[in-house]
Amino acid sequence: MAENDHPPPLDELEKRLAAARDIQADRERGKGSGLAAEGKSYGLAIRLAIEMVSTLAVGVFLGWVLDRWLDSGPWLLIVGFFLGAAAGSLNVYRVSQTMIREPGDGETG
C-alpha cells in the first residue's frame, strides 16, 4: 500500500460484516434466495406422491395375491385397492398436519 492509500474505516467494515451476517441468518431461516424452500417443497411433493402410490400398489398387490391364493375373484383386489388408497390418504394427511404445526409450539409428535 502506498502512503496515500488508507484502509477502509472500521465502521464500514462493521457494516459489511453485519450485512453478511443478516444474509446468512436469512438463509438459515429459509428466507434466502428461495431456492432452498423451493427444493424442500419439491422434495415434500415427491415424498407424498411416492407414499400414495406405494401404499396403493401394496394394497392392490396383496389383494391380487390373496385372490389368486383363495380363488375369490376380484373381490380382495378391490378391497386391497380401497385399503391402500385409505392408507395413502392417511399418510398424506399426517404429513400435512405436521406441516401446519409451527415448530416449537410445544407439541411432540
Image: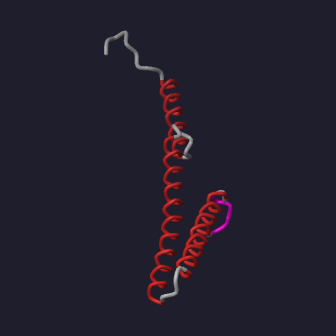
In the displayed image of the protein, which residue is found farthest to the left?
1
Q: Could you tell me which residue is drawn at 55 percent across and 45 percent down? A: 30
Give the answer, above or below, for where 34 lies relative to 15.
below
Instruction: Please give the count of numbered marks on the rendered protein.
Output: 0
Q: Is residue 91 left or right of residue 43?
A: right
Q: Is residue 1 left or right of residue 43?
A: left
In the rendering, at what x and y percent does residue 77 appear?
53, 78
In the rendering, at what x and y percent does residue 1 appear?
31, 16
Residue 98: quadrant of the picture: bottom right
In the displayed image of the protein, which residue is found farthest to the bottom?
70
| Foreground pick, 88 / 16 | 88
Give the answer, above or below, for where 18 lies relative to 82.
above
| Foreground pick, 46 / 98 | 46
| Foreground pick, 42 / 105 | 42
In the displayed image of the protein, which residue is found farthest to the top?
4
In the rendering, at what x and y percent does residue 59 appear?
51, 75
Q: Could you tell me which residue is drawn at 50 percent across and 74 percent down? A: 60
Q: Could you tell me which residue is drawn at 68 percent across and 61 percent down? A: 105
- Residue 106, magenta (yes or no): yes
- Residue 70, magenta (yes or no): no
Q: Is residue 4 left or right of residue 50?
A: left
Where is the C terminus found, in terms of image quarters?
bottom right
Where are the magenta residues, as a range? 103-108
Instruction: Please identify the dominant SS of the magenta region.
Output: loop
Q: Could you tell me which residue is drawn at 47 percent across and 21 percent down? A: 9
In the rendering, at what x and y percent does residue 29 appear?
56, 46
Give the answer, above or below, for where 15 lies relative to 62.
above
| Foreground pick, 19 / 78 | 78
Give the answer, above or below, for where 89 lies relative to 45.
below
